[in-house]
Amino acid sequence: MTAPFIGYHGGHEQFTPGELVDLAVAAERAGFQGLSLSDHLHPWQENQGHAGHAWITLAAIGQRTERLLLGTSVTCPIYRYHPLEVAHAFASLAVLYPGRVFLGVGTGEALNEGVAGGWGPYSERSARLVEAVRLIRRLWTGDWVTSAGPAFPLENARLYDAPAQPVPIYVAASGPKSAALAGELGDGWITDASTLAGRPEIGEAFRAAAAAAGKRPAEMPVLAELYAAVGNEAEALAVAPLWQFGPVMGELISEPDPREVQRRAGDLSSPERTVRSWAIGRDAAVHVRRIEELFAAGATQVYVHSAQPDQRRVIEFYGREVLPALARPDRS
């Protein structure tokens, strides 16, 4: 039996880039197989306090690790970042760490994109994402690329250090329209635990669109992020105010100011509601069961994201008790 793929999610909203590098090293030593990083200019909430540059952090992590699969969850290539720059950065990462890099993309949030002067309705953002992904893939061929746009016109652009093989592009989605886009456009799908396990119609939209595009959806990667707390509910509730936007993210997607996101999340949500979908406990069986439920629901990779300040405790607990339990031959 092959051990299930369990990754570690590094929150740029939680820690400095240097801390995230050290945590990634610890995660690899503990037995995690991949690392996903949030890619933000601003944190979701003002009280989170951090937002380093994900691409710089990934490059540093690659130098300090040997096996971790590395990628973003997720990069928005449609306003703040021009797709040419995204293609250039991830081509260089893939040259540095061949076979270890993926690019997660999505339609973004106003708190990261609006500051750069761009934000529009979903129809505009999804159209720009389609154009961006197609342009990125063309640039990764190493050929000269000219494009009329409309969003991203290019004339005679070439990446001289192109990746030896295309970097997988996974599209983030939590609704039926974006899931269909992930199936049609992406090499895989990035989602969260609540969507994957609790809304099967979203997965159906992904698989139907992938099949219609001539792909084999059963063979496509599905990455699911699981919030986890190693401790009791009181410990989870203590850190929940930093993540209170989570249950109401859809209502805050067009709010450009993290201070206002924090205020509105305080009005719209609560710590109790925030932790409702988390895996919480000191018993490894609790965490093992939640992860197995995600694989049963269609995940191929699960990335564990803990909101706790003591990440070493979480990483060591998973390395000592959770990952070995998931890898046991009798858990087939």
Image (cartoon, rainbow, N blue to C red):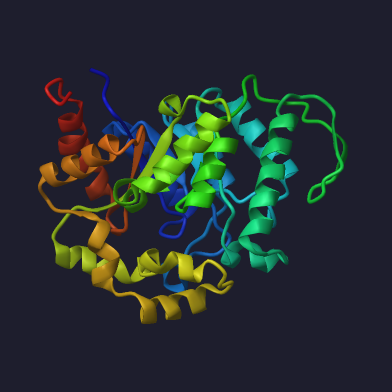
Estimate the x, y position of residue 159 in percent, counting from the top left: 77, 30
Horizontal side of 156 relative to 216 (left or right) equals: right
**For residue 297, which quarter of the picture?**
top left
Quarter of the image containing the N terminus?
A: top left
Residue placed most toward the observer, 138 or 201: 201
Q: Is any part of residue 61 visible from this angle?
A: no
Residue placed most toward the observer, 209 or 225: 209
Quarter of the image containing the C terminus?
A: top left
Estimate the x, y position of residue 84 in percent, counting from the top left: 75, 42
Residue placed most toward the observer, 182 or 190: 182
Estimate the x, y position of residue 117 in percent, counting from the top left: 73, 67
Residue drawn at (58%, 60%), measured in percent from left and top?
41
**For residue 45, which quarter of the picture?**
bottom left
Is 274 above or below relative to 328?
below
Horizontal side of 199 relative to 117 (left or right) equals: left
Horizontal side of 73 relative to 239 (left or right) equals: right
Q: Is any part of residue 142 visible from this angle?
A: yes
Is 172 above or below relative to 137?
below
Is 248 above or below relative to 306?
below
Residue drawn at (28%, 35%), measured in percent from left and top?
295
Residue drawn at (16%, 67%), measured in percent from left and top?
234
Estimate the x, y position of residue 29 in percent, counting from the top left: 31, 32
Residue drawn at (29%, 66%), measured in percent from left and top?
274
Residue placed most toward the observer, 293 or 136: 293
